[in-house]
């Protein structure tokens, strides 16, 4: 066995390798390694070999699974989106033909609400209404588009001529603002 | 006799695969946020199927031993 000689000559180099380092950070492995280095014998060397094999296999499995899960989940989402776009579940958009009678014959209040382009008009909770009233115009318009029209951040950004990140930020700030106001109102009540 | 052994080994393998999937479940759950709410269950299931398919390959792969690894490393460095 000339392994030991080789090991000794390159010891520093080998110990620096991240995988070996990690392997030896386990005290049990380190003890075994030390044993082999100090009084070499076939049995311990074999046992160390086995231990390392298991350790290395685990690392490989973790590495593989990690990238597999990450990549597969992204791929899956892309595939689902593509399918949804290609095979929409409903095709009866208003522009695709006349509206169904049940849709046109809705009650007057709903119809009135449909015409309202202000989010606060759709709110039944008085405190929430007040909170929305206090938002800036921009926040109001973004929140309206998100929750009333169900627009995506990208669509809003395109219509307002701003970046998607900015819209997302405004949306977040708006929600934060509402939350803060509601909390303040709660405290005021107590 | 050998049939018994075979059966035991198979059982072991099944256990290994289940263990593997259980180990990686938290990671899967974390990655579920990559897709919309409606698709999360599907994604979880598909990921588990994929893991099951790949488990054989992963659990039975050949990896280098300690000495082999060091020899390889030394070769690479020089």
Image (cartoon, coloured by chain):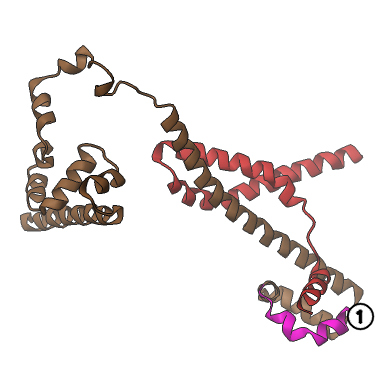
Is residue A141 located in the magenta-colored stretch of the structure?
Answer: no
Q: Main secondary structure of the magenta part?
A: helix
Answer with the quarter of the image where residue A39 lies: bottom right
* Along the line of sight, the residue nearer the viewer: A65 or A78: A78
Residue A188 screen position, x and y as percent? 6, 57
Residue B76 screen position, x and y as percent? 77, 74
Q: Chain of mark 1?
A: A
Answer with the quarter of the image where residue A36 lies: bottom right
Determine the residue positioned at 72% across, 51% down: B58
Q: Which residues are magenta?
A: A1-18
Q: Residues within 10 Å of mark 1 (few under 14, many from 20)?
A: few
Chain A, hue in figure: brown
Chain B, hue in figure: red
Q: Quadrant of the N terminus of chain A?
A: bottom right
Number of on-image labels: 1
Answer with the quarter of the image where residue A186 lies: bottom left
Badge 1 is on which residue?
A2
User: Which residue lies most toward the front here?
Assistant: A161
Relative to A111, A65 lies left or right: right
Q: Is residue A168 above or below residue A102?
A: below
* Along the line of sight, the residue nearer the viewer: B26 or A67: A67
User: Which residue lies most toward the top here?
Assistant: A101
Q: Quadrant of the C terminus of chain A?
A: bottom left
Determine the residue positioned at 14% across, 48% down: A140
Is residue A3 located in the magenta-colored stretch of the structure?
Answer: yes
* Along the line of sight, the residue nearer the viewer: A155 or B43: A155
């Amino acid at each position: 066995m000339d392994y030991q000689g080789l090991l000794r000559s390159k010891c520093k180099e080998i110990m620096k390798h991240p995988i070996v380092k990690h392997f030896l950070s386990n005290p049990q492995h380190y003890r075994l390694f030390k044993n082999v280095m100090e009084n070499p014998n076939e049995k311990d060397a074999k046992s160390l070999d086995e231990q390392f094999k298991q350790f290395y296999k685990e690392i490989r499995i973790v590495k593989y699974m990690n990238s597999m899960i990450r990549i597969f989940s992204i791929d899956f989402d892309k595939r689902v989106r593509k399918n949804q776009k290609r095979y929409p579940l409903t095709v009866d958009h208003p522009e695709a033909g006349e509206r169904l009678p049940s849709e046109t014959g809705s009650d007057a209040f709903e119809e009135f609400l449909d015409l309202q382009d202000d989010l606060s008009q759709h709110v039944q909770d008085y405190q929430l209404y007040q909170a929305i009233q206090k938002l800036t115009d921009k926040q109001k318009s973004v929140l309206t588009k998100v929750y009333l029209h169900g627009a995506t951040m990208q669509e809003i950004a395109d219509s307002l001529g701003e970046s998607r990140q900015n819209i997302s930020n405004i949306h977040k700030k708006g929600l934060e603002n509402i939350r803060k106001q509601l909390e303040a109102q709660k405290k005021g009540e107590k | 006799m050998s049939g018994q052994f075979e059966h035991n080994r198979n059982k072991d393998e099944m256990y290994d695969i289940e263990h593997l999937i259980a180990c990686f479940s938290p990671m899967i759950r974390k990655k579920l946020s990559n897709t919309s709410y409606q698709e999360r269950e599907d994604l979880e299931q598909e990921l588990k199927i994929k893991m099951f398919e790949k488990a054989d390959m992963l659990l039975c792969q050949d990896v280098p031993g300690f000495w082999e690894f060091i020899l390889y490393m030394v070769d690479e460095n020089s």
